[in-house]
Image: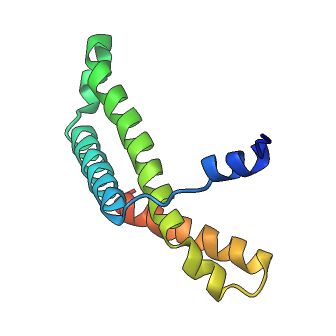
């Protein structure tokens, strides 16, 4: 009995598209985290920086905002990848469109920045 290892690997490693609802839920959670972190940073007073014990919350909020915001931008840009490929004439055009989408989504995530 022969086992076709290549076929087994190809079947096991076949890409799986996640459900659309999962992407929507993830986007909602990331947007919520980003907004909450931005609100925390907006409410922080510069005068409180004198005491290092007060640095924990703003540092965590900045980390959450940066991480969740970056993930949100990446998720949204990745979601529109197929439409950019269809609209692009060549690889350079695709790269330009992708960079434009990244900049646009970043402005949406951080509108006041």
Indicate left or right for 62 with 89 as reference: left
Using residue 24 as the reference point, say whether residue 67 is left or right of it: right
Above or below, comparing residue 71 to residue 43 in the picture:
below
Q: Nearer the viewer, residue 21 or 97?
A: 21
**Residue at 69% of width from left, 84% of height from top?**
88
Instruction: Find residue 42 and report its horizontal and vertical position in percent.
Output: 24, 43
Above-or-below relation of 95 to 106: below
Query: Where residue 69 sits: x, y (%)?
Result: 41, 50
Up-down relation of residue 64 to residue 13 (above or below):
above
| Quadrant of the snapshot with the C terminus | bottom left
Q: Residue at x 77, y 46 (%)?
A: 4
Of the pair 78 and 104, the residue shown nearer to us? 78
Q: Which one is nearer the viewer's eye here, 94 or 49?
A: 94
Q: How is the image coloured?
A: rainbow
Quadrant of residue 14 in the image? bottom right
Residue at x 37%, y 42% (from the top left corner): 65
> Residue drawn at (54%, 65%), measured in percent from left and top?
102
Looking at the image, residue 9 lies above or below residue 45: below
Provide residue 107's location: percent of width, then percent of height: 43, 65
- Residue 93: which quarter of the image? bottom right
């Amino acid at each position: 009995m022969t086992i076709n290892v290549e076929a087994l690997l190809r079947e096991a490693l076949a890409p799986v598209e996640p459900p659309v609802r999962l992407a929507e839920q993830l986007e909602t959670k990331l947007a919520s985290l980003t907004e909450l972190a931005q609100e925390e940073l907006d409410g922080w007073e510069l005068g409180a920086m004198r005491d290092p014990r007060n640095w924990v919350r703003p540092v965590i909020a900045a980390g959450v905002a940066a991480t969740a915001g970056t993930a949100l931008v990446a998720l949204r840009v990745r979601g529109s990848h197929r439409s950019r490929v269809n609209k692009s004439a060549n690889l350079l055009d695709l790269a330009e469109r992708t960079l434009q989408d990244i900049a646009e989504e970043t402005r949406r995530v951080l509108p006041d920045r």
